[in-house]
Image (cartoon, rainbow, N blue to C red):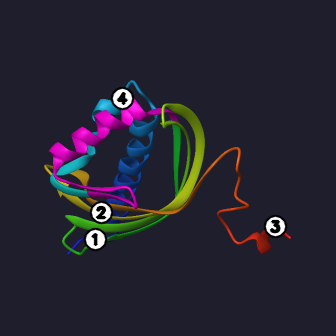
């Protein structure tokens, strides 16, 4: 049974793991480290785009991401993290906002998106890692188009 202090330390370590996830996506100098955040048998779902199983597929995704995304900023906020009583497993849920410049049909396009991350974590050799990420997109649009066509127009009066 995990004590309160160890539970709080685990939650903070998982928050740091998620911060590294955002930094490793956004900084080309450290993107190669992105796969190190995952367990070997991890599942990474980017709904509705793709689903990856295992570290080899996640490494391939990282390579493609570096080629397709010119610039990005990931923001993961409002974490709800539950650490299991064994102190070795945890679950989390985050809200997400993404701004990026991506190459779409050979043209650079500025995009923004929002959604949620539903995650499971596992402690491996003393470090927390992602064992599953389900990134669910709520909406995505270009900067030029804005939100008017992606969200209920009544919200804009």
Which residue is tagged 2? Answer: 6
Cα separation between marks 2 and 3 = 46 Å
Cα separation between marks 1 and 3 = 48 Å
Task: Indicate whether residue 48 is drawn in magenta.
Answer: yes
Q: Are marks 1 and 2 in contact (CB under 8 Å)?
A: yes
Which residue is tagged 1? Answer: 3
Identify the residue at image location x=20%, y=56%.
42
Identify the residue at image location x=58%, y=37%.
109
| First reached walking from the N terminus: tag 4 or tag 3 | 4
The x and y percentages for residue 6 are 29, 63
In the rendered image of this protein, does residue 113 appear above or below residue 99? Answer: below
Quadrant in which the C terminus is drawn: bottom right
Identify the residue at image location x=28%, y=67%.
90
Residue nearest the observer in this picture, 132 or 79: 132
Taking 104 as reference, is 145 left or right? right
Q: Secondary structure at mark 1?
A: loop
Which residue is tagged 3? Answer: 156
In the rendered image of this protein, does residue 74 appear above or below residue 89? Answer: above
Q: In front: mark 2 or mark 3?
A: 3
| First reached walking from the N terminus: tag 1 or tag 3 | 1
The residue furthest right is 157
Q: In front: mark 4 or mark 3?
A: 3
Which residue is tagged 4? Answer: 30
**Label total for image:** 4
Q: Are marks 4 and 2 in contact (CB under 8 Å)?
A: no
- Write down the region rendered in magenta: 44-71
């Amino acid at each position: 049974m995990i004590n309160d202090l160890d539970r709080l330390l685990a939650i903070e370590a998982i928050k740091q793991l998620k911060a590294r996830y955002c930094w490793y996506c956004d900084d080309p100098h450290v993107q190669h480290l992105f796969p190190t955040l995952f367990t070997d048998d991890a599942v990474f779902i980017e709904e509705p785009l793709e689903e990856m199983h295992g570290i080899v597929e996640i490494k391939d995704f990282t390579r493609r991401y570096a080629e397709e995304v010119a610039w990005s900023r990931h923001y993961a906020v409002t974490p709800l993290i539950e650490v299991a009583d064994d102190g070795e497993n945890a679950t989390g849920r985050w809200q997400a906002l993404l701004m990026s410049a991506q190459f779409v049909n050979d043209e650079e396009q500025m995009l923004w998106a929002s959604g949620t991350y539903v995650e499971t974590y596992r402690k491996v050799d003393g470090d927390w890692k992602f064992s599953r990420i389900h990134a669910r997109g709520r909406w995505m649009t270009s900067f030029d188009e804005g939100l008017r066509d992606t969200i209920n127009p009544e919200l804009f009066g």
